[in-house]
Image (cartoon, grey):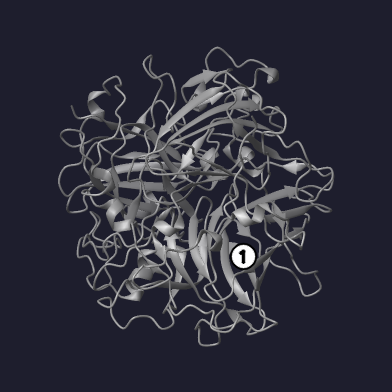
């Protein structure tokens, strides 16, 4: 029997949209009886993409697994959309995926040419980004992989890899057979949106830029969003949309570039340029001198170029946005074409976890908890105090670096920001206004045309804001998600230097910068600091490129394998922005708007990090966070804490809860930077 593909809105299966460019939901595979069992084939798209008759990307062809040993989907049973597929699961489910590599040899392996020719054979693997699940290795008793990136799956038709991969790209196991994954989702895993993509260091940018990405949803929006203040009416699934943002650089010969050039087109359109509706025209790049003339940089939504997004009357819709680009960042706005102003929307969830409004928190404090991702504003008709009910977070723009997910409620609002019946000419534009990281300039593009259905008399809902039963505090609290006993896979005891956790009051400090002796390389540094901000002797590791043979961070869970929390300072000592991401967990930004920390660094400068007061307590959880740059920095640790520091970068301080035993990584999720070496290995050890 062929695969059963379900649409999130069953009515959508009855007829195609009247407008051929109306946004179409990604195809969906839902778990059955607590199990989602799929065959996933990474391959060249069987059909042209992005309305380009001669351009093909790389896609995941997916079907329900016909047999345990299958390597091909039965005819008519699969989907392979460039825009991405949605995997729908529930807390407590088991996800089984057989991943088959049918990719062609890679055309350009920028970060692998001098290290391992095996990467040119285009190995792949799979990572479930943002999920709190085990990074298991296979064992005899359980010969499947968890969410573990230390495995290479090769396509034998491209040639056989060397007996042992050499150099820094040797992640671990190498196979020319399919990779079988089995991932246990905890019974109280937060409901929300996550995503999946390949994670082969050195060519992750190539594979994601070519289209290899999809989304995972756990539970439903109705688990945490309601239309009324008392939550008697959960949010309707019919009023939920999934928007997967991808970009593709297509050269004049119709070939897809998998090593992206941020100067492919100018940052913004000139007065004489045509409107940038989903794309911009290529140019002679002023920096590299590469000629992209005649090409197009296409920014798609669900694989569609400048689609029309209809919005329901009255209550509006909840959009679940995912930045599935390899390196491109977005500064997203909803532009009211009639009022000529940015529209207000409500933020419901960040990085797969619904936001929590702690008692006593103000709207400004909640917005600050979203760090630099959310440009918050006062919500129209908000409750006068938090004692009335959960305080909503509203915004006029989102800063979405690669891998970021945000859920927002979009509805038509009048000039005062209040819900209103949409006039006949109501029209918004979803756009990114451009994003300058200090190193790259991501262009301004209009992404979609947003149209509002006219509201019938009396159809407007009475609640101005969605009531959010936030899960952020519950997830991060040690009595919540992190207190659940999870399956533990026995593993060899880690070395002694990997068994010691931080002393009370100590922190880890992670530096993002440039390895010594390189002009444009990427790397991470490390040191431990004590309760006074003084570096602990013998812990400093200067900025260096990724070394999978060594765990830079080692820690041990609490007695009986109970979760532990740590505080990390993230310091960007380079002159361009980076995006911190860590696997297998979530973190909160430590923020205090009323008390300035009096701790000082060892060199006497006032510490720019936030204080340890948990305020607001886990209002917003993240699995990636922008690290803004400072032009005074030169990429070295010495420029920040040397005898005469010139770098004025401010640390971003986060509290991270660890519960998953095994090996995983933290890195910059700008994949150009990650492939270039800005990644490090972490090992979390058992505590028998």
Residue under label 1: 434
**Residue 280 seen anywhere in this rendered image of the structure:** yes
**Frontmost residue, 36 versus 306:** 36
Residue lying at 49% horizontally and 62% vertically, measured from the top left:
236
Residue 370 image position (x, y, % from top left): 39, 64
Residue lying at 49% horizontally and 65% vertically, measured from the top left:
408
Residue 99 image position (x, y, % from top left): 57, 28
- Residue pushed farthest bottom? 416
The N terminus, quarter of image = top right
**Depicted 313 relative to depicted 247: above or below:** below
**Residue 285 seen anywhere in this rendered image of the structure:** no
**Depicted 177 relative to depicted 435: above or below:** above
Residue 340 image position (x, y, % from top left): 64, 83
**Frontmost residue, 223 versus 353:** 223
Dividing the picture into quadrants, the one containing residue 451 is bottom right
Of helix, strand and loop, which one carries label 1? loop
Residue 577 image position (x, y, % from top left): 49, 56
**Frontmost residue, 455 versus 669:** 455
Q: What is the number of callouts on the image?
A: 1
Residue lying at 30% horizontally and 21% vertically, measured from the top left:
491
**Side of 93 relative to 242 (left or right):** left
Residue lying at 49% horizontally and 54% vertically, measured from the top left:
404
The C terminus, quarter of image = top left
Dividing the picture into quadrants, the one containing residue 70 is top right
**Frontmost residue, 396 versus 113:** 396
**Depicted 47 relative to depicted 505: above or below:** above
């Amino acid at each position: 029997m062929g695969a059963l593909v379900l649409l999130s809105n069953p009515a959508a299966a009855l007829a195609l949209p009247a407008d051929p460019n109306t946004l179409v939901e990604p195809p969906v595979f839902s778990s059955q009886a607590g199990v989602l069992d799929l065959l996933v084939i990474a391959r060249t798209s069987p059909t042209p993409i992005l309305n380009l008759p001669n351009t093909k990307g790389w896609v995941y062809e997916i079907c329900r697994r016909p047999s345990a040993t299958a390597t091909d989907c039965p005819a008519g049973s699969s989907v392979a959309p460039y825009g991405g597929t949605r995997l729908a699961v529930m807390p407590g489910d088991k996800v089984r995926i057989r991943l088959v590599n049918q990719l062609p040899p890679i055309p350009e392996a920028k970060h692998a040419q001098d290290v391992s020719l095996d990467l040119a054979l285009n190995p792949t693997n799979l990572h479930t980004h943002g999920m709190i699940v085990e990074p298991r290795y296979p064992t005899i008793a359980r010969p499947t992989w968890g969410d573990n990136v230390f495995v290479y799956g090769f396509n034998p038709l491209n040639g056989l890899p060397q007996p042992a991969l050499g150099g820094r790209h040797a992640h671990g196991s190498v196979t020319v057979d399919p990779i079988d994954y089995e991932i246990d989702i905890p019974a109280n895993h937060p409901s929300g949106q996550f995503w999946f993509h390949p994670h082969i260091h050195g060519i992750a940018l190539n594979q994601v830029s070519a289209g290899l990405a999809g989304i995972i949803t756990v539970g439903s929006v109705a688990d945490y969003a309601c239309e009324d203040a008392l939550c008697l009416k959960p949010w309707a699934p019919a009023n939920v949309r999934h928007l997967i943002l991808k970009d593709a650089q297509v050269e004049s010969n119709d070939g897809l570039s998998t090593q992206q050039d941020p100067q492919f087109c100018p940052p913004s359109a000139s007065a004489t340029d045509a409107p940038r509706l989903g794309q911009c025209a290529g140019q002679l790049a002023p920096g590299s001198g590469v000629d992209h003339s005649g090409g197009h940089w296409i920014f798609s939504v669900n694989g569609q170029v400048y689609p029309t997004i209809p919005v329901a009357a009255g209550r509006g819709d909840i959009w679940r946005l995912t930045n599935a680009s390899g390196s491109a960042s977005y500064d997203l706005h909803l532009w009211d074409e009639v009022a000529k102003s940015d529209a207000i929307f409500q933020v419901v969830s960040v990085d797969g976890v619904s936001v929590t409004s702690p008692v006593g928190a103000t709207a400004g404090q909640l917005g600050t908890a979203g760090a630099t991702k959310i440009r918050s504003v006062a919500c129209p008709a908000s409750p006068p105090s938090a004692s009335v009910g959960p305080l909503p977070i509203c915004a006029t723009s989102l800063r979405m670096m690669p891998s970021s997910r945000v859920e927002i409620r979009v509805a038509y609002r009048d000039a005062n920001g209040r819900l209103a019946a949409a006039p006949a000419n109501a029209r918004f534009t979803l756009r990114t206004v451009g994003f300058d990281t200090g190193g790259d300039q991501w262009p301004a593009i209009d992404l979609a045309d947003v149209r509002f259905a006219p509201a019938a008399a009396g159809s407007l809902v009475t609640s101005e804001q969605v009531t959010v039963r936030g899960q952020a505090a519950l997830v991060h609290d040690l009595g919540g998600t992190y207190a659940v006993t999870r399956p533990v896979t026995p593993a060899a005891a880690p070395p002694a230097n990997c068994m010691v956790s931080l002393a009370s009051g100590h922190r880890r400090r992670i530096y993002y910068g440039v390895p010594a002796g390189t002009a444009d390389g990427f790397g991470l540094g490390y040191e431990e600091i004590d309760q006074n901000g003084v570096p602990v002797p013998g812990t400093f590791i200067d900025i260096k490129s990724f070394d999978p043979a060594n765990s830079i961070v080692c820690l041990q869970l609490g007695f009986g394998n109970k979760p532990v929390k740590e505080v990390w300072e993230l310091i960007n000592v380079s002159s361009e922005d980076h995006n911190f991401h860590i696997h297998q967990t979530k973190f909160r930004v430590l923020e205090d708007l009323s008390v300035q920390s009096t701790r000082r660094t060892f060199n006497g400068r006032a510490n720019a990090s936030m204080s340890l007061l948990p305020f607001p307590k886990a209002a917003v959880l993240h699995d990636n966070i922008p690290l803004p740059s400072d032009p005074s920095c030169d990429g070295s640790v010495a420029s920040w804490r040397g005898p005469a520091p010139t770098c004025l970068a401010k640390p971003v301080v986060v509290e991270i809860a660890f519960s998953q035993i095994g090996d995983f990584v933290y890195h910059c999720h700008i994949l150009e930077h990650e492939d270039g070496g800005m990644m490090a290995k972490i090992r979390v050890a058992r505590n028998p």
